[in-house]
Image: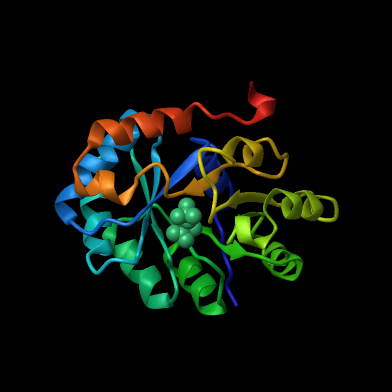
Amino acid sequence: MNLYQENHDLLAICKLAPVIPVLLVDETANAVPLAQALIAGGLRVIEVTLRTENAFDVIEVMAANTTEGIIGAGTLLSKEDVYAAKRAGASFGVSPGVTDQILSACAEVKLPLLPGAATPSEVMNLLSKGYSVQKFFPAQSNGGIAALKSIQGPMPDVSFCPTGGVTSTNALDYLSLENVVCVGGSWVAPKDKIKAADWQAITKLARHASALRKHSET
Ligand code: 3PG
C-alpha cells in the first residue's frame, strides 16, 4: 500500500502558529471574513471541519480568497472526503482517527495529513507508516497532558497536535510539552461570535492565542 505523508510540509505547517483554529462555519458568506479575522490575529493555519453541509464551499472560498491562510479540511472520515477536500483546495487534511482508505487517498492526491491517534498502539501504527506528526484526539478526555507526557518516554519521535478540550486556559500547558508542536481548538472562533459577525472579537481571541508560545521558544 502506498501510504504517504509529506512530513516536512505537515510539520512546517504545524509550526506556523501555536494554535490551529477548528472551525464550524454554517454560512459560506462568513468564510472569508472569519479567516481574515483569524489571520489578522496571527493564526494562519485554519482547519475547517466537515460538519456542515457547506464545508467544502467554505474551504474553497477561504483557500481562494485568503492568500496568507493555510486552509485545511478537518473531520476526514472517508476517501471521498479526501478527494473533495483536495478538489476544494485544502492544503492539508485532519482526521480524528485513521483508516487505510484515508491514508491511501491522501497519498494518491498528495494531501499532507494530520492523522488522529488516541492510544500508544495507534501512535505506533501511524509511526510505523511514517506519520511522525499526529493529532492527539480527543486530547483532554483521553488523559490530556499526563497522557502525552507518558507517551513521550517510549515514543519521543512523535510530535502531537492535541485537539479536543484544549482551551485558552490549558493551551499553554500543552504547548510547554516537548512532544507538542501546536494545539487545535474551537475556542478562538466561538459560534456566537461567528453568528454575530463579531470579527473584532475573533481577532482578539486569535491574537491572544497566537501569543501563546512553547516555553522553549520564550
Ligand atoms: C472538535 O472535535 O471539534 C475539535 O477537536 C475541537 O474540539 P474543541 O471544541 O474541544 O476545541
Looking at the rendered structure, the number of numbered marks drawn on it comes to: 0
Q: Residue furthest top?
A: 218
Residue at the image point whose x is 32% and y is 57% from the top:
24
Q: Residue furthest left?
A: 29
Residue in the foreground of this view, choosing between 117 and 166: 166
x, y percent for residue 11? 57, 45
Residue at the image point whose x is 27% and y is 48% from the top:
192
Q: Is residue 192 above or below residue 138?
A: above
Horizontal relation, residue 14 to residue 146: left or right: left
What's the image's color scheme? rainbow
Q: Quadrant of the N terminus?
A: bottom right
Q: Is residue 151 above or below residue 11?
A: below
Residue in the foreground of this view, choosing between 136 and 147: 147
Residue 180 visible? The answer is yes
Residue 64 visible? The answer is no
x, y percent for residue 159? 67, 48
Q: Quadrant of the C terminus?
A: top right
x, y percent for residue 120? 75, 65
Residue at the image point whose x is 25% and y is 46% from the top:
194
Residue at the image point whose x is 43% and y is 66% from the top:
75
Q: Is residue 196 above or below residue 86?
A: above
Which quadrant holds residue 97? bottom right
Residue in the foreground of this view, choosing between 200 and 71: 200
x, y percent for residue 28? 18, 55
Which quadrant holds residue 115? bottom right
